[in-house]
Amino acid sequence: MKNILIAIPCLLIGGTEYQTLYTVKALVENNYRVTVVCYFEYDEYMVDLYKKAGANVILLSPTGKRPVSLFKTAKFLFINFKKILKKQTYDVVHMQYMAPGSLSFLLFKLLGVKKIIVHAHTPGHIYKNKMVPKIIMKLSAAFICVSKSSEKSFFDVEGELFNKKLIKNGRKHFTIYNCVNIPNYIEKKNKENFTIGVVSRLVYLKGIDILIKALPDVKDKIDKFKVVIIGNGYEKEKLIKLAKKLNVEDKIEWKGFIPKEFLQNYYNLFDIMVIPSRFEGFGLTAVESMSYKIPVIASNVDGLKEIIDDGENGLLFNKEDSKMLADKILQIYNDQKLKNKLGKNAYEKVKQKFSYEVYKNKINELYELIVKEK
């Protein structure tokens, strides 16, 4: 049995961590022995999910705190990586490219790891110096991006979906889309209000303020509607103040964190899902919503543009444009035929491109090549 080490800076409740969980499941189901090392912050709920998926989980920092300087971080990681690699030989290290991603890669290389798969969940344009990921790509066994637009922004060439021929022809970077489990059943619930869903961390890059700024225009045209916001984050209090300032606080329900296994109850309530992100490497919430036949209205950025075909399986609006977002919400509210079409087409696209089975097959095809490679 081959041994795989998945290295990730944190195991908190977020899209990257859930997608990494799917990677664990895919590898375990293909008879790899998987160990996950988390360097810093973690949530017990996520750690438990990883263990249930069949992974051995190593937490380097029991308190979840990070060292206060680059030197101390490097020393902390080097000592702990060395201990892990001394206890067990790993055929592949699969590294999530999150800060301190470049440092982690360098340390694994210094410690003699030959096969490192790098997995980037963000678009490359957020990095000031793209020479670093380009060098890392050349020294890695493979560099996975989660969308073709992200791959292009990292490497300045058109992104390509992974296939075996790419690796055999010497290409090291490619796209493997993130995934979701297709729900076993969808049971839409009858309700009085038109319900707008948001499932997101409440942080600046997710753009929830853009949605709140759109609500006064929506309120002028729709009497019975509500916005259900699921998630927590450092901007919550700021967003609540904004809603009060715009006199739309009565339209918003703040639900906080809800475990993934209970989200289905909410997806069955939502008429639409709004994803107003300022940038988005992929857009896992979009795909998850689409799997429940929910029309998604999303900002026209990065990976979201690849998930949503505007007017076919969802609607796109210009980033930061709250007025345009309000118009899109009203468009679906006023057109039940459009709403049904978008939901049906969204479900079909998820089945074809973003299902767990599709992802599992791609990851294991990649591993088959990397593990056998001399």
Image (cartoon, rainbow, N blue to C red):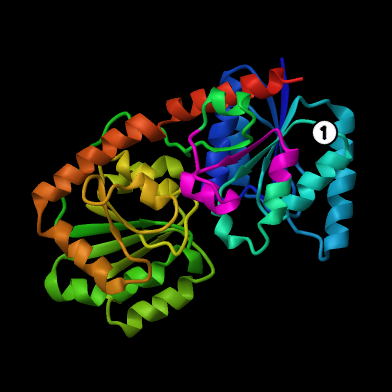
Q: Left or right? Give the position of 164 relative to 327.
A: right
The answer to whether residue 61 shows anywhere in this view is: no
Residue wearing tag 1: 113
- Magenta span of residues: 136-161
45 or 166: which is nearer to us? 166
The answer to whether residue 64 shows anywhere in this view is: yes
As for residue 150 lying within the magenta part, the answer is yes
As for residue 320 lying within the magenta part, the answer is no
Could you say which quadrant of the image residue 208 lies in?
bottom left
148 or 111: which is nearer to us? 148
Residue 114 location (% of width, % of height): 80, 31
Q: Left or right? Give the position of 172 relative to 152.
A: right
Element on which disc 1 rests: loop
**Picture layout, residue 8 above or below residue 321:** above
Q: Left or right? Give the position of 236 relative to 186.
A: right
The amino acid type found where label 1 is placed reads Val
- Quadrant where the N terminus lies? top right
**Picture layout, residue 27 above or below residue 253:** above
